[in-house]
Image (tube, rainbow, N blue to C red):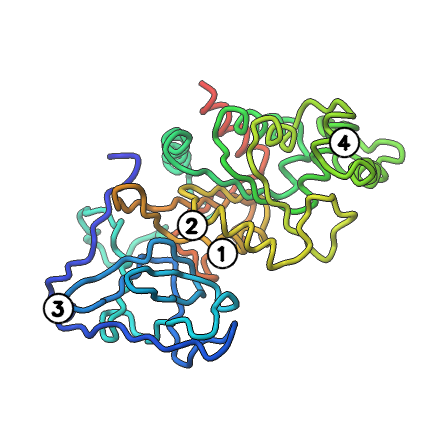
Amino acid sequence: MSVIPAYTPPDFTIPSLVEAPAVTVEAAPADGVVPKNFHGTSNHPEYLHLGDNHWLLAPESRMDAVIVLKGETIDVVEARRVRKGDSVVIGRTENGEEGIYIHIDGFTPLEEAAVDKFSFRTRGTRETPFSRCYDDLYNVLRHDRDHGHIVWVLGPAVAFDKDSRDAMQGLIENGYCHGLMAGNALAVHDLEAALFRTGLGQDIYSQTLKPLGHYNHLDIINEVRSRGSISRTIKELKLNDGIIYACEKQQVPYVLAGSIRDDGPLPEVISDVYQAQDAMRAHARKATTVVALATQLHSIAFGNMVPSYRVMEGNNVRPVFFYIVDMTEFSADKLANRGSAQAVAILTNAQDFTVNLWNNLKK
């Protein structure tokens, strides 16, 4: 089977779609306000009927946004971005009744359906073996290193362990990361490890507590803030390893989104939540594979911005792969409950996952 599954578009010759009306739009009454009965987007491929059986696919979708139609240009935007007078698509049906068709089976493999109506183990749990998931992920990452846009969403646990931190550095330096989404904590503790070899005061290898180690993350924040930037701090303190170091070295962009509980924060942290959302959304629009590791809040936030598909050059449609990696089912279930049903869960700890990945991809 090909690494990237083929896409099967809807059959627009079926009578219900041939007879579907053209989509309807209404002018936005004010900036940031949309018409009543507006159409809220999903993360599935969505088509609009422009008349005469001419259906157009939204090229960059996301859930919980709205569609602004400009001639034959479809713009999926957050409602706060709508300007007064914009032509906003209205209608809340999904099968062509109002000129809107949501296609959920485009990447479904044409395999023989199970003959049994009852079966065990139909969803991933902590009892699920993940060998196939890992093999698929290795292949996807090898493909997308050169032909896609790989985005990592990381929690600080990745920086607390020497092996996982080293593995993540290797992945970044070898082209397996085109964008990094995180919070203040990931960057702080990764830089703490680079300077003090600790994470929240614990040795990143032995996990032993260091005397006054609980000051270390505050000290590195102070060092960075006194210099005005992470890049200058890395240079002046001669830091030469870690996740953020690798991003700076390889010029991989990273987005650090702020939260209420942040210490400091580091100068690069975006404290305005909507500016942070916009910065993350820029990567969501380009993502072809997302790996969200050990961070519930950022996983859900980024997952809500990512469509299940991308329109590539030549109007080729491909899936966006989304892997969520955590020690418990809670994060994966939470993400699915927020609408990202396409996310594949791998239940393990950050160290084992990252080291496993790197050991197989560095070959």
Which residue is painted at 49% across and 56% down in the image?
335
Q: Earlier in the sequence, mark 1 or mark 2?
A: 1
The tag on residue 343 is: 2
Residue at mark 3 to residue at mark 2: CA–CA distance: 33 Å
Which residue is painted at 57% across and 31% down in the image?
251
Which residue is painted at 48% across and 61% down in the image?
338
Q: Earlier in the sequence, mark 3 or mark 4?
A: 3
Question: Which residue is denoted by mark 4 in the rendering?
Answer: 198
Q: Nearer the viewer, mark 1 or mark 3?
A: 3
Does the image show residue 330?
A: no
Which image quarter holds the C terminus? top left
Q: Are marks 1 and 3 in contact (CB under 8 Å)?
A: no
- Quarter holding residue 37: bottom left
Question: Which residue is denoted by mark 3 in the rendering?
Answer: 18
The disc labelled 1 sits on which kind of residue?
Leu
Kind of element beneath mark 3:
helix
The disc labelled 4 sits on which kind of residue?
Thr
Question: Which residue is denoted by mark 1 in the rendering?
Answer: 335
Q: As displayed, is residue 302 above or below residue 128?
A: below
Q: Residue furthest top?
A: 363
Residue at mark 1 to residue at mark 3: CA–CA distance: 36 Å
Q: Are marks 1 and 2 in contact (CB under 8 Å)?
A: yes
Mark 3 surroundings: few (<14), some (14-19) or many (≥20) residues within 10 A? some
* Residue 207, image x, y percentages: 74, 31
